[in-house]
């Protein structure tokens, strides 16, 4: 995606016809148009200051647009939840071994702390891990339901 790029475009009839092949309901045009693969050119211009009031596009809408872009073209957030869950589960096991060593080799252990906190973190980590695994399957289903064209034929010989 281009820096400071707007949604205004001049597209050929051929590109528009290929864009119609995307059957998605929520089209994120800033990502889909470059995905078409047609030649593109950029027209640069000096953008003047706004002269008529303030923007009607608040920060919350900008965040929602960013989220739409990420969720339309990436399954990484779902994968991150699986990684975070795995790390959290492993860290809780490490914390459990640390608490056990404190209990066995010193007299500074706090009664009930380890038996309460460590299982909570371990189970939370497992839940995140399996949520990420399930999310991976849902991401595959989501990708299939978009029915994006696998390829675009530029010309036939």
Image: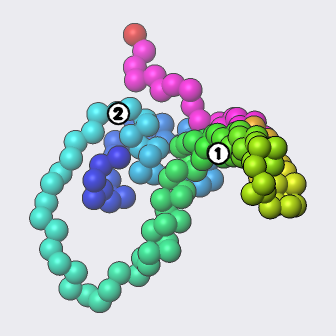
C-alpha distance separating marks 2 and 1: 38 Å
Q: What residue sits 42% from the left and 15% below the top?
A: 156
Query: Measured from the top left, where is residue 50 in percent x and y?
Result: 22, 81
Quadrant containing the C terminus is top left
* Circle 2 or circle 1, nearest the eye: 1
SS at mark 1 in the image: helix
Q: Which residue is mark 2?
A: 38
Q: Is residue 84 visible?
A: yes
Q: Is residue 52 left or right of residue 142?
A: left
Q: Please rate how many residues cluster around mark 1, counting C-alpha atoms within 10 Å: few if below 14, some from 14 to 19, many from 20.
A: some
Query: Measured from the top left, where is residue 145 in percent x and y?
Result: 71, 40
Residue 84: give its label: 1
Q: Is residue 18 left or right of residue 108?
A: left
Q: Is residue 41 left or right of residue 59?
A: left
Q: Is residue 92 visible?
A: no
Q: What residue sits 60% from the left and 47% below the top?
A: 77
User: Farthest residue toward the left?
Assistant: 46
Q: Earlier in the sequence, mark 2 or mark 1?
A: 2
Residue bounds of the magenta highlight: 134-156
Q: What residue sits 41% from the left and 81% below the top?
A: 56
- Proximity of marks 2 and 1: CB atoms separated by less than 8 Å: no
Q: What residue sits 82% from the left and 43% below the top?
A: 104
Q: Nearer the viewer, residue 134 or 111?
A: 111
Residue 40: give its label: none
- Colour setting: rainbow
């Amino acid at each position: 995606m281009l820096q400071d790029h707007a949604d205004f475009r001049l597209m050929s009839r051929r590109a528009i016809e290929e864009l119609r092949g995307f059957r998605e309901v929520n089209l994120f045009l800033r990502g889909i148009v470059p995905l078409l693969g047609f030649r593109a050119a950029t027209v640069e211009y000096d953008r003047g200051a706004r002269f008529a009031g303030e923007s009607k596009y608040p920060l919350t809408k900008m965040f929602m647009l960013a989220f739409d872009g990420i969720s339309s073209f990436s399954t990484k957030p779902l994968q991150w939840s699986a990684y975070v869950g795995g790390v959290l589960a492993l860290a809780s096991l490490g914390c459990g071994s640390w608490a056990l060593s404190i209990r066995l080799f010193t007299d500074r252990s706090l009664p009930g702390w380890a038996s309460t906190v460590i299982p909570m973190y371990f189970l939370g980590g497992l839940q995140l891990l399996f949520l990420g695994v399930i999310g991976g399957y849902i991401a595959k289903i989501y990708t299939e339901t978009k029915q994006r064209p696998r390829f675009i034929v530029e010309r036939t010989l």
